[in-house]
């Protein structure tokens, strides 16, 4: 069983199409989407239309929740734009997406952690920086979930880590947004340093789970130009470079 993990598309349909083409060339048996699919100044409606035609397991991330229950006073501009582009059928589709999912006896899916779509699983944000989470923090975030593989997204950082009990935790990184800044719970930057689209493949061989973190080049310039057209120069730089400043 070879399973492709995608996450954090953020309306970047060309990046998603490049990732899916690459995954299919590697003969994956299944694809799962870990959420944050539409939010951003790119192609939310077109991406929703693409995803709604798929038979994959797909999760709601924090941005699906924020789009669905958009707060016009406190809501983020990325969610505001996405919400304005989506029709009723697309919003109804978002509403039925689960926050977590048990794929099989071995594999559990979530967006952030099993108990929160806003907490990074493999990183910890402090007032000073964002650092790799400690083993104790990772163990705590696993909670009561018993699985051989825990799959998460949210931080946009591709990473595969083993908890102390041997559980493999895999974040495939972001399909569509390789850098961003955020204020929750403290200001921090995420910069992957490349415009490539990211995803992962997990595979069980000889009763051992393996993870491959993959980087896929695509034509990102039209998406950077679209972000700029929609008054998000920060997204344009992030998409073009994988950094938040040039």
Image (cartoon, rainbow, N blue to C red):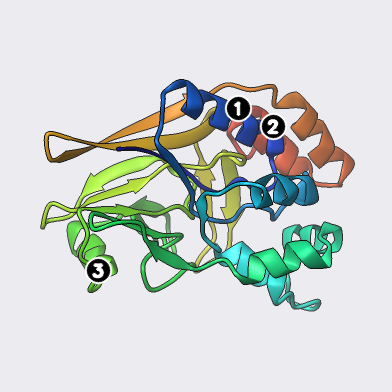
Above/below status of 151 relative to 235: below
Q: Which residue is mark 2?
A: 14
Q: Residue furthest right?
A: 229
Q: Are marks 3 and 1 in contact (CB under 8 Å)?
A: no
Residue 195 in view = no
SS class of the residue under badge 2? helix
SS class of the residue under badge 3? loop
Q: Which residue does the image show at 68% across and 53% down from the upper left?
A: 38
Q: Which residue does the image show at 48% across and 29% down from the upper left?
A: 23
Q: Quadrant of the N terminus?
A: top left
Q: CA distance from mark 3 to mark 1?
A: 33 Å
Residue 54: percent from left, percent from top: 60, 46
**Marks 2 and 3, the one that precedes in the sequence:** 2
Residue 199: percent from left, percent from top: 46, 36
Q: CA distance from mark 1 to mark 2?
A: 6 Å
Q: CA distance from mark 2 to mark 3?
A: 34 Å
Q: Specify the quadrant of the image occupied by residue 4.
A: top left
Query: Horizontal placement of 200 versus 59: left or right?
Result: left
Q: Quadrant of the C terminus?
A: top right
Mark 2 surroundings: few (<14), some (14-19) or many (≥20) residues within 10 A? many
Q: Which residue is mark 3?
A: 145
Q: Are marks 1 and 2 in contact (CB under 8 Å)?
A: yes
**Marks 3 and 1, the one that precedes in the sequence:** 1
Residue 152: percent from left, percent from top: 40, 54
Above/below status of 77 relative to 179: below
Q: Which residue is mark 1?
A: 18
Query: Horizontal placement of 136 versus 126: left or right?
Result: left
């Amino acid at each position: 069983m070879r399973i492709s993990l995608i996450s954090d598309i953020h309306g970047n349909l060309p990046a998603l199409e490049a990732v899916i083409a690459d995954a299919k060339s590697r003969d994956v048996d299944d694809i799962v989407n870990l959420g944050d699919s539409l939010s951003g100044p790119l192609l939310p409606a077109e991406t929703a239309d693409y995803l709604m035609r798929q038979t994959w397991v797909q999760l709601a991330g924090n941005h699906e929740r924020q789009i669905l229950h958009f707060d016009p006073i406190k809501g983020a501009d990325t969610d505001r734009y996405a919400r304005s582009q989506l029709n009723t059928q697309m919003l109804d589709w978002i509403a039925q997406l689960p926050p977590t999912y048990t794929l099989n006896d071995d594999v559990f899916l979530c967006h952030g952690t099993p108990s929160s779509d806003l907490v990074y699983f493999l990183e910890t944000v402090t007032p000073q920086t964002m650092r790799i989470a400690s083993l104790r923090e990772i163990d705590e975030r696993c909670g009561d979930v018993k699985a051989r593989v825990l799959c998460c997204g949210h931080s946009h950082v591709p990473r595969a880590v083993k908890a102390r009990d041997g559980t493999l935790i895999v974040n495939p990184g972001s399909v569509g947004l390789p850098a961003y800044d955020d204020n929750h719970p403290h200001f921090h930057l995420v910069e992957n340093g490349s415009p490539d689209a990211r995803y992962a493949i997990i595979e069980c061989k000889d009763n051992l789970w393996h993870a491959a973190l993959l980087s896929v080049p695509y034509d990102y310039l039209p998406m950077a130009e679209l972000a700029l057209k929609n008054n998000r120069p920060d997204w344009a730089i992030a998409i073009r470079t994988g950094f938040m400043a040039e």
